[in-house]
Structures are given as C-alpha cells and as structure tokens.
Image: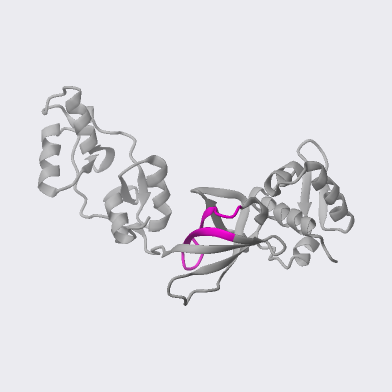
Amino acid sequence: MELSLIQKDILITLITLYHQQSHSIKGEEIADLILRNPGTVRNQMQSLKAVGLVDGVPGPKGGYIPTELAYKELNLNTSGTDYDVPISRDGEEVRGVHVQEIDFTTLCHPDICHAVIKLVGSSKIFEIGDKITIGPTPVNKLLIRGEVFGKDEAKQSLLIATSEMISLPKQPIRAYMSTPLLSLTGTLTIRDAVSLFSRKHIHGAPVIDSGNLSGIVTMSDITKALDRGLPLDSPLTAIMTKEVVEAPADIKLFEVIRRFKEREIGRLIVTENGKPVGILTQSDIIRVFPSL
C-alpha cells in the first residue's frame, strides 16, 4: 500500500515511542513530536487502523500500538535492535528519535565530511543549523558530532556536516584507573592528607577503614575546611565526603563519562567484588580522548 508522507511520519514515530515505552501511545504524544495538530494525527490514525497498520487500545490509559503489518510495510526489524543509537541536540537526547543508518558521502574529501543520517522517528523536529551528536554506535562505539545543513522528510533523514568523529575506548575502566590505590584512614588528620597530596602530586584520595570505603577527601574539601577555621589536626572524618561515586572495574570507560558530568565530580572510586581497587579521574579520561 502507498502511505502518504504524514502517515509514514506518524507510523515511524508510533513505532519508536512504542519500543521506548512498551505501552500504547496517545495521539497527542505523536503530535507533539512531529509538530502536527492532534486532530490531524487522530484522523490519520483512523485511516491507518482501517488498513491494519495500527490497533487502538481503549480506556483512559489507552492509545495506539503498531501491528506486525506496520513493521513489514516500513521494512523495519521487529526485534528493536535497530533503534538503540541515540541522537542528541545541544547535549540533550532527542526523545522519540533514533539513528538507524549513517552513510558518509564525502569521507575522502580533505576538508569536508558530510553524512546522511537515516532516522527512526521524525526528521521534522530538527532544524537547519542544529548541533547534534550521534551515538555511541553499538559495535564500534563511534560518536559523531556535526551540524544539520539539510533534511529529507520523505526519507526521514538528515544531512549533516560532521565536525568530529570519536571512536570511544572499548576497554573497561580497570585499564585506565590509577593503581595501586593511594588512600587515607578516618583517624588521620587534614595535615596527613595535605602531606600525601603534596608527596604524590594528587588532588584527592578515598578514606578506607578496615578495607571498606567510608568517604573521600579532596583538595577542595581541605580548602573549605581551612576557610572555616578548622585546625590542621582535625580528623578527616570531619571534612570528608561520605557519599562516594563508585563504578565496577569491568564497566566500559565511555559508560562512566556521563557520571562525571551529571554528578559534577572530578574522580570516582573503582571497585572489584565490592572493594576499592583504584581511582579514575577526569585527567585519566582526558588523556584517553581530550576532545570530550
């Protein structure tokens, strides 16, 4: 059957939202994403329902779900594995849209690298000039940054001028952490911490008592304590941060980058079998890929 452009737009957006949320989708949600009037979407849904591409779910929590025929009509994989490559705009992930295919059109040009980005979802919500980030891709962990300079709403694709391509490291963080772990105990003093930081040229260390992580002390903590007038002989338990960000040693490096940004931290403690074994800092990450 021959679907109109708006019908394809609605159907692809419905499938994308359905895979994200695993429940029926309201017409208003689709309308918000594709920038259409909700009444228009509802009318088109009735047409799609009549030809067997969507089913209606009644009730206050009802909405629409795609049928198997919808996937066949759009030549989509029903497993959902094609829909896990995110696309972000200005640092915020765009809801309801994922990247299905990346086709580099001018990869060999010395000054230009353009790409066609095929979407699962609506291209209508993007504007010329949008700064976007794609990825990481599931296999090669490729991260692509660029600017939208065109779009094809019929094919649900964006044309982008790439500004950066990064292949994120696939190794776990144990390969990048600092070890052996330099640590302090809660009975030591601010003076002891300053001495350790000065001798080892570091800016923070975990506080470990009886093999268990109880906190972390940084140069920032020490500076704030001295500003409050605390003496150098004060115990570290009086100034340490008790809520420590941890990560298992086998997690991939690119997976923890977001934690640094979201928690606004400079370091995290790496653990193995629940025990601290190393420390990963922003400096360690920058050494691996300085452009992030």
Number of marks present in the image shown: 0
Image coords of residue 291 (percent x, y): 36, 57
Which quarter of the figure has residue 110?
Answer: bottom left
Q: Nearer the viewer, residue 214 or 98?
A: 98
Farthest residue in the top direction? 229
**Within the magenta stretch, is there residue 5?**
no
Residue 80 visible in the current orientation: no
Farthest residue in the bottom direction? 108
Which quarter of the figure has residue 101?
Answer: bottom right
User: Residue drawn at (82%, 42%), measured in percent from left and top?
Assistant: 39
Lateral position of residue 272 relative to residue 35, left or right: left
Lateral position of residue 162 relative to residue 17, left or right: left
Residue 168 visible in the current orientation: yes
Lateral position of residue 155 relative to residue 67, left or right: left
Q: How is the image coloured?
A: one colour
User: Residue drawn at (35%, 45%), measured in percent from left and top?
Assistant: 246
**Within the magenta stretch, is there residue 140?**
yes
Where are the magenta residues, as a range? 127-149
User: Residue drawn at (48%, 62%), measured in percent from left and top?
Assistant: 144
Q: Nearer the viewer, residue 139 or 135?
A: 135
Image coords of residue 48 (percent x, y): 84, 55
Dividing the image into 4 quarters, which one contains the C terminus? bottom left
